[in-house]
Image (cartoon, rainbow, N blue to C red):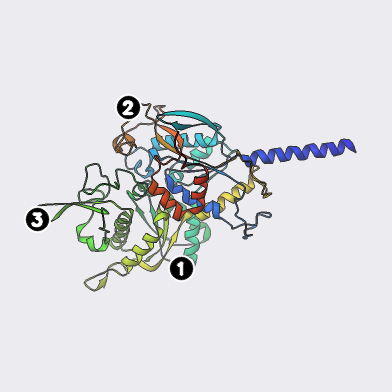
Amino acid sequence: MVKFSYLVCLITVLRIAQFGYGQQLPIGVFDSGTGGLTVLEAMLSLDAFNNKTGVQKPDGIPDFTGEYFHYLADQANMPYGNYASENKTLFLKEQILRCMSFLSTDTTYAERTKETFQFYSKLRAKMIVVACNTATAYALPEIKKSVGKGVPVVGVIDAGCKAALDYQQKQRGTVGVFATVGTVASDGYPKALERMATAAGITNLSIVSQGGYGLAESIDRDWSFLADQVNKVRAEYKGPSLSNEKYRIDTTLIKAYGFLRAANSLLCEYDQNGNCTEMQLNDPANYVRYHLVSLLEKMNREHYHAPLNTLILGCTHFPYMRDTISRVLLELYNFQVNGAYRYRKVLSENVCLIDPAVETAKEAYVTLRQSSTIQRRAFLARKESVTDAFFIAVPNLDLPEIETQPDGWFTYRYKYGRQEGSGKDFVRFVPFDTKNVALETYDRLKSALPHSYDRITKAGVFSPIH
């Protein structure tokens, strides 16, 4: 009897130890920039399940209670959306897999100490959520293979498609995919939508896509697409303009765009007669305006019969602009030319904006619950030594060849001129601080993503750099 009791006790201790180890491993969340924090926010605020039974029914307790996270933003290599247009998708995959190796292994990260770096150890992730749409579209199978079967991986695209199709079953119309150029080029969303629509018995699905060139970059203050302090056009600018052959601002649509002009939101170069000879966007809201008009103009040209009534925000950065997107769509619904509504044939008055983050959070919960490492909802107090961590990729200045622009990030030419197979470490993985993430970004996070901002603050992001 004593031996039996001892055996039961030993088994119980081993189970607790195994459970505790599993819990002490973080959940990895990955994106090309800070946009993936919208997915982390959805995970932190999710209450869609009963934590004891796993049944999809809220119980008043956040579903990821007791979990902690390692977030990684591959900021140095973003925007991912442009690698496809530069024929560098193989190089992109290589960099994504480097990031996966960082998250999924017990390795080190670098921390700035004045002008040098010291290295510290970090734990591997027990699950990875790929919050980046472009990474999901181009590399999800490779990611799953690289991290191994022991680390479940959740991607973001199917989750967004499911929510869009749920709305289409209630109200038929055209589904819009508003994503990065790379995600659109991959055809990932249309393929997933068609596959899932067929399975759901939905026929004749109408889909339109728009690559939001420069929008994610402007949100993350990429120098090539937005410069806070400038007040005149500049040669380094890469976004839509009067002279950009691929992304040209159409002067006949100036009233439709309705660009913001306050401060330096819109930059113009004038000739001696006061005519604007060059125009550059310098505000994320103006990028939204340019691309939504471009989307509706495409629908008019291609004679779409079903009006746009569903819009998937297929880039994790785009939900930051949700209110702006809603407001601009309503403006365009009411926009008239010579007394005629220009876009009402192709645009519904009410457009359902789909943020894939919530559906991704739900899928992550189900996946984690099914894995052997999930905390079985015991809500044990976390050890003081266990904390969240927020990492960002920055240029590795130890490589003498590296070219950087005034804001310290890679130049456009260098970023997209690199080749796969070099074996070089182009970046270092370091914690978020107030140098590698702009204060304006933290201000945006504080108001838009309060749970994530709280975790970032507690991780010591605002502590002085020693």
Q: Would you call the spot at circle 1 few (<14 residues within 10 Å), some (14-19), or many (20 or more)?
A: few
Q: Which residue is mark 3?
A: 273
Q: Nearer the viewer, residue 85 or 3?
A: 3
Q: Which residue is mark 2?
A: 401
Q: Splitting the image into 4 quarters, where does residue 336 fall? A: bottom left
Q: CA distance from mark 3 to mark 2?
A: 45 Å
**Residue that protrudes farthest toward the right in the picture:** 1
**Closer to the N terminus: mark 3 or mark 2?**
3
SS state under label 2: loop
Image location (x, y in percent) of residue 294: 29, 57
* Front position among marks 3 and 2: 3
Residue drawn at 28 percent across, 51 percent down: 282
* Front position among marks 1 and 2: 2
Q: Which residue is mark 1?
A: 171
| Proximity of marks 3 and 2: CB atoms separated by less than 8 Å | no
Image location (x, y in percent) of residue 453: 48, 49
What amino acid type should be assigned to the residue bearing mark 1? Gln
Q: Splitting the image into 4 quarters, where does residue 344 fall? A: bottom left
Image location (x, y in percent) of residue 313: 42, 55
SS state under label 1: loop
> Compared with residue 375, is residue 249 higher up or lower down, i.e. above or below?
below
What amino acid type should be assigned to the residue bearing mark 2? Glu
Q: Which image quadrant: the C terminus? A: top left
Image location (x, y in percent) of residue 183: 39, 48
| Proximity of marks 1 and 2: CB atoms separated by less than 8 Å | no
Q: Is residue 403 left or right of residue 311?
A: left
Q: Is residue 177 left or right of residue 245?
A: right
